[in-house]
Image (spheres, rainbow, N blue to C red):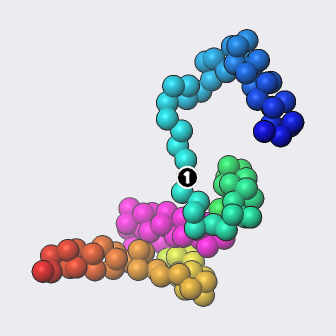
Amino acid sequence: MWLIDQWAERHIEEARQRGDFDNLPGAGKPLTLDDDSHVPADLRAGYRLLKNAGYLPPELEARKEALAIVDLLKAVHEKHPDYPALNKRLTLLELRLKQAGLSTDFLHGKYSIKLIKRMTEG
């Protein structure tokens, strides 16, 4: 064990004995670990830092906004004054997602239809 590891372990053990770790949020509960195996090892710390800060990549932010607009459009009548603007924004987001190479089937329910069809086959 390296000297720095021994130093860290000693300080952690002293803090544990003093009770510094008692009553922490989530104490006694299993850790929720993210599966970041698809992220290269040298980028994982950076990705985790951005995620913990609440940052989403632009494509995922656009997807999140598009889903929110789809929900709004379902609740708003077509004659509502905001409907055209919402529909226009959704179209723009859909084009942006397609340009990024992402499927937009999730916006139109096509994915669920394909999934149900595939599950009922066979």
Q: Identify which residue is drawn at 61% across, 73% down.
A: 59
Q: Position of residue 58 (x, y in %)?
A: 66, 70
Residue 61 x/y as whole percent: 61, 66
Q: Label 1: how many residues lie within 10 Å, few (<14), some (14-19) or many (20+)?
A: few
The residue that mark 1 highlights is 34
Q: Which residues are magenta?
A: 57-86
Q: Residue furthest left?
A: 122
Relative to residue 105, is residue 13 drawn left or right?
right
Magenta part, dominant SS: helix
Question: Residue at the spot x=55%, y=52% of the render?
Answer: 34
Q: Is residue 21 above or below residue 96?
A: above
- The answer to whether residue 105 is left or right of residue 11 is left
Q: Is residue 80 magenta?
A: yes
| Residue type pointed to by label 1 | Asp
Query: Is 26 drawn above or below residue 73 in the view shown?
Result: above
Q: Which residue occupies the foreground of this view, 47 or 58?
A: 47
Most extreme residue toward the right is 3
Q: Is residue 56 visible?
A: yes
Residue, x 61% and y 83% (percent of image)?
A: 100
Q: Position of residue 75 (x, y in %)?
A: 38, 62
Q: Quadrant of the N terminus?
A: top right
Q: Which residue is rendered at x = 48% and y = 72% of the image?
A: 83
Q: Is residue 113 visible?
A: no
Q: Quadrant of residue 38?
A: bottom right
